[in-house]
């Protein structure tokens, strides 16, 4: 079979739970990991959903990521905490950190939690959305292994360092901005490689600042640090590339300088002898309980009105719709719940491989 098939949401989610459990993750934690990944697929962020399952599988099998998550509270006050994730499952560490920030916010208005020794936690937007569901605003950032060059540089120094913020509204969906700070992120290049499509010019440069467009070459070169993503705004200062660079640096500081964790090239995941080691990522989570400021319903109305006013404003010729962040993802979720998650042949092969290696029963109807 060469075509993309749709697999029901609950089947994809259960397969991910089965894979994580078979790898040694406790079931409760496996469900958190699978929920973050399926939320990504539901929201149309294919780069970070089930397509990433093999990435976690490989790291766990290679022994660089622990399936048992033991989080240590290094320091704590009423409104703040510093956690050590102990190189456990990134989604579980991040989920518990955001939960702690929200519990603090519920009591004291704000909760801020810094994490060190975290691992890849998937889409950053999952965690602020937890806050928005409970009437709070949420903010999450994380650093990541180096992939992006600073303005006027060609060396990958900063990670794709995403910023995510969500706020409840009176629309059927919250505002949710969730994006990396380079023009694009590594996962989208992996998606283009799987789809056998070129990378648009202006996303990635080589060591001389020349554009690269072959996704396979780019992914190989990332491994050798001879290709770098460009910051939001692109090359140089003319289109504001320095602003993407500044935002990525802000994320790096929030992720490392509050947690005392690793930063920039120390996040390469390589020990001094060249062997693989955990990434030791840093994250930062903030929850703000709106009721400590104004009534939640008023805040929802104001946020909703801001979104509606933007949507209703004058359109660019040829465009009949202005979106707000979180809107496309909401619509995608309605569609995917109905039609299932699209799975292409390459991904199907990966899923089949993991099922067989881990001797998981079932799923024969799909691969
Ligand atoms: N964990 C990590 O290390 C890591 C690193 C990088 C990225 N990520 C994740 O990858 C995902 C994708 O990142 P990305 O940079 O490719 O995102 P993207 O470029 O697809 O932008 C997504 C954001 O833009 C909004 N948006 C899209 N079109 C819009 C429009 N026309 N008008 C208004 N808003 C619009 C979306 O609602 C969303 O908030 C994110 O979920 C991010 O958290 C994770």
Image (cartoon, rainbow, N blue to C red):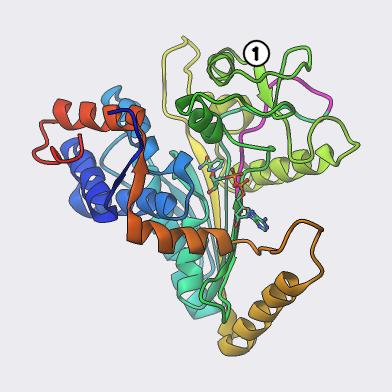
Residue that label 1 marks: 226
> Residue 62 lies in what quarter of the image?
top left
Q: Secondary structure at mark 1?
A: loop
Q: Where residue 162 sits: x, y (%)?
A: 60, 46
Nearer to us in this view, 32 or 170: 170
Q: Quadrant of the C terminus?
A: top left
Q: Is residue 264 depicted above or below 49 in this figure?
A: above
Q: Main secondary structure of the magenta part?
A: loop
The picture places residue 93, in percent across and down from the top left corner, at: 39, 49
Q: Residue at x 61, y 27 (%)?
A: 146
Residue 261 forms part of the magenta stretch: no
Above/below status of 77 relative to 366: below
In this rendering, would 139 be left or right of 4? Answer: right
Farthest front residue in view: 318
The span shown in magenta is 152-163
Residue 224: quadrant of the picture: top right
Asked if residue 344 shows in the view, the reply is: yes
Dot 1, crowdedness within 10 Å: few (<14), some or many (≥20)? some
């Amino acid at each position: 079979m060469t075509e993309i098939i749709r697999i029901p949401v609950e089947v994809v989610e259960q397969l991910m739970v089965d894979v994580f459990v078979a790898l040694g993750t406790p079931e409760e934690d496996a469900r958190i990991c699978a929920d973050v990944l399926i939320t990504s697929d539901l929201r149309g962020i294919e780069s970070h959903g089930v397509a990433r399952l093999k990435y976690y599988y490989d790291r766990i099998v290679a022994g660089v990521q622990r399936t048992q998550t033991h989080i240590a509270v290094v320091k704590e006050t009423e409104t703040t905490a510093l956690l050590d994730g102990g190189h456990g499952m990134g989604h579980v560490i991040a989920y518990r950190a955001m939960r702690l920030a929200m519990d603090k916010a519920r009591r004291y208005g704000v909760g801020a939690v810094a994490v060190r020794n975290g691992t890849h936690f998937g889409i950053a937007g999952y965690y602020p959305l937890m806050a928005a569901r409970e009437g709070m605003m949420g903010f999450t950032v994380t650093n990541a292994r180096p992939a992006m060059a600073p303005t006027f540089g060609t060396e990958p120094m900063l990670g794709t360092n995403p910023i995510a913020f969500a706020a409840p509204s009176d629309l059927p969906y919250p505002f949710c901005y969730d994006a990396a700070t380079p023009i694009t992120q590594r996962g989208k290049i992996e998606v283009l490689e799987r789809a056998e499509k070129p990378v648009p010019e202006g996303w990635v440069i080589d060591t001389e600042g020349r554009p690269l467009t072959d996704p396979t070459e780019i992914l190989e070169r990332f491994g050798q640090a001879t290709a770098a993503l460009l910051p939001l705004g692109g090359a140089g200062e003319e289109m504001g590339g320095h602003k993407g660079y500044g935002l990525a640096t802000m994320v790096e500081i929030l992720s490392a300088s509050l947690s005392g964790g690793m930063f920039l090239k120390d996040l390469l995941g390589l020990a001094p002898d060249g062997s693989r080691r955990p990434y030791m990522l840093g994250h930062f989570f903030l929850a703000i309980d709106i009721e400590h400021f104004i009534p939640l319903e008023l805040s929802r109305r104001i946020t909703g009105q801001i979104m509606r006013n933007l949507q209703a404003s004058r359109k660019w010729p040829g465009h009949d719709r202005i979106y707000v962040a979180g809107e496309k993802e909401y619509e995608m979720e309605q569609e995917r719940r109905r039609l299932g998650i699209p799975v292409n042949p390459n991904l199907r092969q990966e899923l089949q491989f993991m099922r067989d290696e881990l001797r998981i029963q079932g799923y024969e109807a799909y691969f």
